[in-house]
Amino acid sequence: DAMVIQNPRYQVTQFGKPVTLSCSQTLNHNVMYWYQQKSSQAPKLLFHYYDKDFNNEADTPDNFQSRRPNTSFCFLDIRSPGLGDAAMYLCATSPRGGEQFFGPGTRLTVL
Amino acid sequence: GEDVEQSLFLSVREGDSSVINCTYTDSSSTYLYWYKQEPGAGLQLLTYIFSNMDMKQDQRLTVLLNKKDKHLSLRIADTQTGDSAIYFCAGKAAGNKLTFGGGTRVLVKP
């Protein structure tokens, strides 16, 4: 089945220790998105790729970076995680102008 | 930017209908979506409505859109315990970006 896959589902890191979250898709969609969702809140868009074009939201901290080496994969790098970065991180994909399909999320814990 | 608001909580008995309400501010939203999120999971697209439609029905789900009042609702008929989840409405603005409401937690009681 075509889908959006996120690995790992649960990630524990230490304060200040870099961490990378992974997203892959078999839908062959042009656009990939990363959202941060804190407890009992709506998802907040961090950035998105339209093909290889990177689009950063104005209020996304510099601590968050992303890479998209090919159509199928997109990575979220958190350079120096703080306690406030503990959240669910959701990856989504869409065709151009189409609806977004979400992965299951990675729950990040920062100790 | 767009603001999307939802009530926080809804409790309903199994078998009854649920109605979840949403208001939005950006009249240029072309599509409006309803997503379902179960505990610890991602968002599942339930249904959507194009902004020039008033109503869309999909099995147990009915979406009503009042463009004049910028009000969107999702009705779930014959609500089941598996419908317990958080429901997010979202509007699509320029650049295919979604603006989400804060989510409505629906609790279905047996």
Image: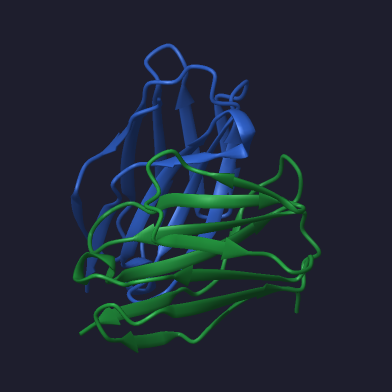
Percent position of residue A109, x then y: 28, 81
Percent position of residue B51, x then y: 59, 24
Towards the viewer: A53 or B62: A53
Q: Is residue A3 visible?
A: no
On the picture, is A24 further left or further right than B91?
right
Quadrant of the frame with the N terminus of chain A: bottom right
- Give the colour scheme shown: by chain
Q: Is residue B106 visible?
A: yes
On the picture, is B2 further left or further right than A87?
right
Percent position of residue A41, x then y: 26, 54
On the picture, is B104 further left or further right than B46?
left
How many labels sit on residues? 0
Residue A97 figure quarter: top right
Q: Residue at x 34, y 60 (%)?
A: A37
Q: Residue at x 77, y 58 (%)?
A: A29
Question: On screen, B19 above or below B82?
Answer: above
Of the chain colours in the picture, the one used for chain A is green
Residue furthest to the top? B68
Quadrant of the frame with the C terminus of chain A: bottom left
The blue chain is B
Residue B105 figure quarter: bottom left
Percent position of residue B42, x then y: 46, 69
Towards the viewer: B66 or B6: B6
Towards the viewer: B98 or B18: B98
Q: Residue at x 41, y 43 (%)?
A: B89
Towards the viewer: A64 or B50: A64
On the picture, is A6 further left or further right than A81?
right
